[in-house]
Amino acid sequence: MTRASILGSKIFRQQAFIAGRWTDSGDGSTFDVSDPADGSVIARVTNCTTEDVQRALDQASVAWDGWKDRTGKERAAILRRWFDLMIENRDHLAGLISLEQGKPLREAADEVTYGTAYIEWFAEEAKRVEGHILPGHQRDKRIMVIRQPIGVVAAITPWNFPIAMITRKCAPALAAGCPVVVKPASQTPLCALALAELGRLAGLPDGVLSVLPSNRSAAIGKHLTESRIVRKLSFTGSTQTGRILLQQSASTIKKASMELGGNAPVIIFDDADIDKAVDGALAAKFRNAGQTCVCANRIYVQSSIYDEFAARFALAVERLTVGASLQGDFDLGPLIDEKALGKVRELVADATDKGAVVLAGGKVHDLGGTFYKPTVLSGVTERMAIATEEVFGPVASLLRFNTEAEVIARANDTEFGLASYIFSQNIDRVFRVAEKIEAGMVGINTGLISTEIAPFGGVKESGLGREGSRFGIEDYLEMKYLCLSVEAE
């Protein structure tokens, strides 16, 4: 696949999508979208203003009545067509991901499959929004509980999964009967706009889905959070930004879902299958060049197998290939930008200055730009910043531990609690540790845990709410209690 074929596809759009129409911003401004592999400009996209956002919100409010009054089956049919169109355009969507985000084409195609799965899942869940009949508290009373769509939803999405993070929010909202206004990351708006075009072709009514690219993130976020039209905010991004958005939402007592930062521990016990642990740690750490919120950030290895695991893991990491996706079949692409590269370099320098040893990589790749070599650091301790901060890069930190109680305490010693991973063949230990780890998700003898059928989300400062699974639609519904007085004959 070539850049020309990707940018020449029917789903490539550069304007904002507001209330069923492709439009420029109110002030006519644009911003550049660059290929992280070489820094070249690939598109000039509409730079929406707060006035544009208000126009989208007003139209979404108008569209809400018609959309919520449709049956779940009717909404499901449109979502299913959206799913089918994404599958038909899978190659071009994968190409867009690779071009604006940088991940390898194989991995980008997997993201498209993952993203479409949320649309398929919630299309089916649209028909299963159920209520309850409760026993009456008096003989002449009947109690019913119904669930209704919450209203207009604002979705703010990150750059690391530019397809999946949008479908994971939009699919349950639309299935529940809620219009959605999406503010995609300014680094990766092209995928969001492509999804809007496919949604339009699938038959989403005007105003039900709007996509507003902008690099005025702070102003747009503030407008969405303080708007009384928006009844629900769904955000994926950093904990720091999440705090700001929650504070801004307080004035309107807005319902919020927050999928925030992580500091995922991987715990490898001495009774683990080392081959499986190596493969699992590779998957957990180096997916998307380490730029995921569920990435392995701290790999704790029990002392008796530490040296063996470190040697085998470093060898596996050295075999990983790095390159620009459209130039070949590589395992890792570039980091998203220079800021991300700078953070990785600083964390590695801090760790090595304090005694960590580089077993693999440890420097910028020969390709230059924002490419960084897959890296393994041994001898990492908690006094190094890399053990406490989210790396968001291809650097694996190995930490030594002795006892089960010790490693549980160290793993939990963080404000984050998103993902965690355990490798052990002892079933008793697996359950003990999994129950004591403070995280919303635990991978056991696997490094890949994301799926549309399971609840995705964290505890502590890693977020609020869950996405995916049958629980994922609940955040887009309000519960209403009906009390009926029934006269006796």
Image: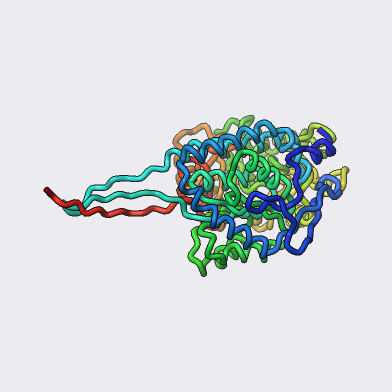
User: Residue at coordinates 23% horizontally, 48% vertically from top-left?
Assistant: 135
Would you say residue 55 is visible in this rendering? Answer: yes
Residue 41 percent coordinates (x, y): 85, 50
User: Is residue 471 left or right of 79 when viewed as pictured?
Assistant: left
Residue 251 percent coordinates (x, y): 52, 69
Residue 244 percent coordinates (x, y): 60, 65
User: Residue at coordinates 56% horizontally, 41% vertically from top-left?
Assistant: 421
> Which quadrant is home to the N terminus?
top right
Residues 317 and 384: in front is 317
Q: Can you tell which quarter of the image residue 237 is in? A: bottom right
Residues 266 and 59: in front is 59
Type of colouring = rainbow
Residue 321 percent coordinates (x, y): 79, 35
237 over 106 or under it: above or below: below
User: Residue at coordinates 69% horizontally, 61% vertically from top-left?
Assistant: 217
User: Is residue 6 left or right of 254 when viewed as pictured?
Assistant: right
Q: Can you tell which quarter of the image residue 221 is in? A: bottom right
Would you say residue 447 is visible in this rendering? Answer: no
Outermost residue, left side: 489
Picture mark count: 0
User: Residue at coordinates 49% horizontally, 40% vertically from top-left?
Assistant: 469
451 over 346 or under it: above or below: above
209 over 424 or under it: above or below: below
Outermost residue, bottom side: 251
